[in-house]
Amino acid sequence: MSRRSRLLGLAAGVALTGLTLAGCAAGAAPSGDDSGSDEGWVTPGKFTVATGEPAYYPWVIDDDPESGEGFEAAVAYAVADQLGFDADDVVWVRTGFDEAIAPGPKDFDVNLQQFSITDERKQSVDFSSPYYETTQVVVTTASSPAADAASIADLKDLVIGAQTGTTSYTAIESVIQPTQGAQAFNTNDDAKLALENGQVDAIVVDLPTAFYISGAELTDGVLVGQLPNPDGATGDQLGFVLAKDSPVTGKVSAAVDALRENGTLDELAEQWLGGEGQAPLLK
């Protein structure tokens, strides 16, 4: 099967449940109309989607977002379909994490690589409605002193790291507040390698990534527990990033809202992020 046929089949599949409901859902983007308008899109008639370099499982499978496999890749194609774009009209580009949320013009319509929606970031970019809500989780190995931690206080004197510029890194600084400070790494892979080498006692990542790292990438991985948000909220909301004051922010948010209302987002989360179980909440 050609890539074109595979993508068209995927786009149809992920949107199947919502096709009849989306048209009447409150706030839904009118199907088939938006992609025909050149207004606002980086490339007329195309939906340009950015993700990381590389993009990680389970958000994108095998660093191949064009396949539509992985939660964020599938969500991107479902949103494109809701906006009226064909799968062939979805164009993927790559950006760094910090580059995507920096002020200034963008070469993408939307960017998704687990960007948490924060007031600080809203000063520089727009966000869509959230497409997923997660929490931050402490991951370690069985031989680490962090493996026996039962509270946030038990983590304070340990060496804990995360990818710089992420909500995971912020959670270390604001929630755990370790005596040695948060240890910064360029990527989650670098943080995981430091954990394996004993350079840090634990790392912090989002919940789906934590389950994958602990179960598939670490031979003796341990989920220590979830971190509470400083404001007492239960989750961290992820949204599409768009250029500040983008003319298509409202359209993208309406598409996300429609997919939430008709159940498509829940179905995709179950497909690509399901079976996680629970990590205890640390206090």
Image (cartoon, rainbow, N blue to C red):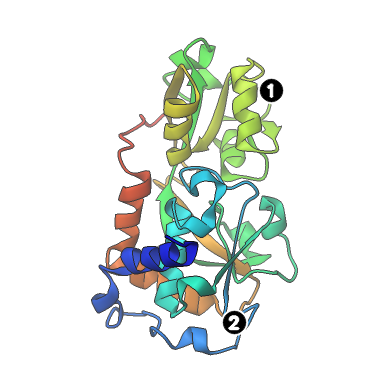
At label 2, which amino acid type do we have? Pro
Would residue 129 be seen by someone viewing this image from the given angle? no
Would residue 28 be seen by someone viewing this image from the given angle? yes
**Among the 4 quarters of the image, the one containing residue 280:** top left
Q: Within 10 angstroms of label 1, few (less than 14), some, or many (20 or more) residues?
A: few
Q: Residue at x 68, y 28 (%)?
A: 181
* Residue 218 position in % (x across, y down): 49, 22
Residue nearer the viewer, 13 or 250 = 13
* Residue 182 position in % (x across, y down): 66, 30
Count the numbered circles shown. Answer: 2
Q: Residue at x 42, y 27 (%)?
A: 215
Q: Within 10 angstroms of label 2, few (less than 14), some, or many (20 or more) residues?
A: some
Identify the residue under disc 1. Answer: 180
Q: In the image, 250: left or right of 179?
A: left
* Tags 1 and 2 touching, CB below 8 Å: no
Identify the residue under disc 2. Answer: 247
Residue nearer the viewer, 82 or 86 = 86
Helix or strand or loop: what does disc 1 sit on? loop
Furthest toward the right, the residue is: 104
Residue nearer the viewer, 252 or 117 = 252
The CA span between labels 1 and 2 is 44 Å
Can you say which quadrant of the picture contains the C terminus?
top left
Q: In the image, 181: left or right of 66?
A: right
Helix or strand or loop: what does disc 2 sit on? loop
**247 to 113, vertically: above or below:** below
Q: Residue at x 50, y 83 (%)?
A: 35
Q: Residue at x 75, y 68 (%)?
A: 104
* Residue 109 position in % (x across, y down): 60, 71
**237 to 8, vertically: above or below:** above
Counting residues from the N terminus, which is met first, the one under dot 1 or under dot 2? 1
At label 1, which amino acid type do we have? Gln
Mark closer to the observer (1, 2)? 2
